[in-house]
Amino acid sequence: MSEIRKQTVPRRIRRGQTVAMALLMVSGIVNYLDRGTLAVANPAIRESLGLSLGQMGLLLSAFSWSYALCQLPIGGLVDRIGPRRLLGAGLIVWSLAQVAGGLVGTFGAFIVARIVLGIGEAPQFPSAARVVTNWFPLRERGTPTGIFNSASPLGTALAPLCLSVLIASFNWRWAFISTGALGLAVAFVWLMLYRDPHNLELTGEERRYLQGDGEDVVAVKRKLTFAEWRALFSHGTTWGMLIGFFGSVYLNWVYLTWLPGYLTMERHMSLVRTGFAASVPFLCGFGGALAAGWLSDLMTKDSRNAVASRRNAVVLAMLGMVAFTIPAALVESNVIALACISVVIFLANAASACSWALATAAAPADRVASLGAIQNFGGFLGGALAPILTGFIAQRAASFVPALLTAAGLAFVGAMAYLLLVRKPIPEQDAAQASDALPA
């Protein structure tokens, strides 16, 4: 093990890793700029289309429903045909849907555009998890996982900073059209530059580095079967990750979809001031994702159980999210509330990075995208419910406080699911033996 850790990264592998991570960062930032456009333009769209808070909640959640449902098949497809083609196609689809969002004139048409956006964005994170598995050995995957996860809070932070000025200067439609055009440019660059390592003629040194702890990722070229994918559901680890990520993403998406509106309506901030204030927590989230990836690798290096060490990092981050959401909901001071929200989003993105790193440790190499996507399916069921329930709870209670406390309770349940159900990696030997048994 120590020899593997001391091994230097071959120059061509390092170059491939750098290109892969740069492309994942750029595509991830665009991904979250597109998702966040609706949240930033929330007040302007409600006024333009005459929508209630409840209708806006439905519109904010439409993306998450299609995104969540597509996670189940998309992970298997990434494992079967590769991340290059799946993410390239996804970039094109979601960018066209984003442009369509800027052209719609009715609530129904907007819903359709957001549903297609969710379908197009579905390959992003399962593809990223498989790219990291392909290009990095097992015990070095936390840092690159943190890097590609950091794109989500960075994109979310940039959205109010960049788009609120565009909306104020022109109108909300240009925010959708410009970010959609940017996505099409990124799709072209991804398809031109990215290649998987198994498509290269590798030297012995390069192959030994990528094999890491003995897991021959480079040799994983065979096509995943449905039986192998279905077998994942026979393990408690899968169910713990699915349920746990539900609670984590639910709480994160309350802030992701409603924070600008919350600061405007509940905290009475102006649009321009909200644009700045809403960006601060997500810049903290960017730091959280990067720090978590590095710390996760550090914890795993000397651990006998990579799954347990990465799981414990997720649980600690989620319990912190719960602890800081309660004062964020209850204090009167906007400054203290924003500080607490910043800590929550720092920890939420740390938990997300560690959750995706957990998928690369818990799954066999040929099913990393599949397990990560199943976990993400659970997460975005939470992401789909969060804006709807938050909108209707806030409308009924005339306050966001009950909605925030509900989200904290669900995150606590999710942390316990990780802690109690995720205990060991999924073995390779039962890959083709799909079982109908429930998780132990």
Image: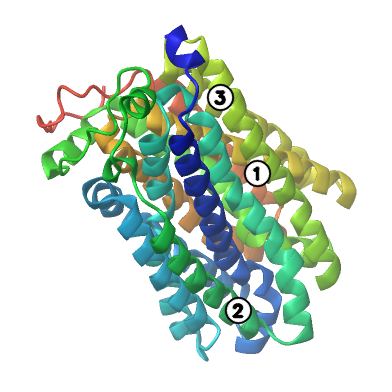
User: First in sequence: mark 2 or mark 3?
Assistant: 2
Q: Position of residue 348 (x, y in %)?
A: 61, 40
Q: What residue is shown at x 73% (from left), y 49% (from top)?
A: 283
Q: Nearer the viewer, residue 183 or 97?
A: 183
Circle 1 SS class: helix
Query: Distance of mark 1 from mark 2, alpha carbons?
Result: 36 Å
Residue labelled with disc 1: 405
Q: Nearer the viewer, residue 114 or 22?
A: 22
Labelled pair 1, 3 in contact (Cβ < 8 Å): no
Quadrant housing the C terminus: top left
Q: Nearer the viewer, residue 68 or 427?
A: 427
Query: Distance of mark 1 from mark 3, alpha carbons?
Result: 29 Å
Q: What residue is shown at x 81% (from left), y 48% (from top)?
A: 338
Q: Is residue 224 above or below residue 433?
A: below
Q: Nearer the viewer, mark 1 or mark 2?
A: 2
Q: What residue is shown at x 82% (from left), y 46% (from top)?
A: 337
Amino acid type, residue under disc 3 in the picture = Ser
Residue labelled with disc 2: 178
Quadrant housing the N terminus: top left
Instruction: Name the disc covering residue 427, or none.
Output: none
User: First in sequence: mark 1 or mark 2?
Assistant: 2
Q: Nearer the viewer, mark 1 or mark 3?
A: 3
Amino acid type, residue under disc 2 in the picture = Ser
Q: Is residue 210 above or below residue 222?
A: above
Query: Distance of mark 2 from mark 3, alpha carbons?
Result: 36 Å
Residue labelled with disc 3: 296
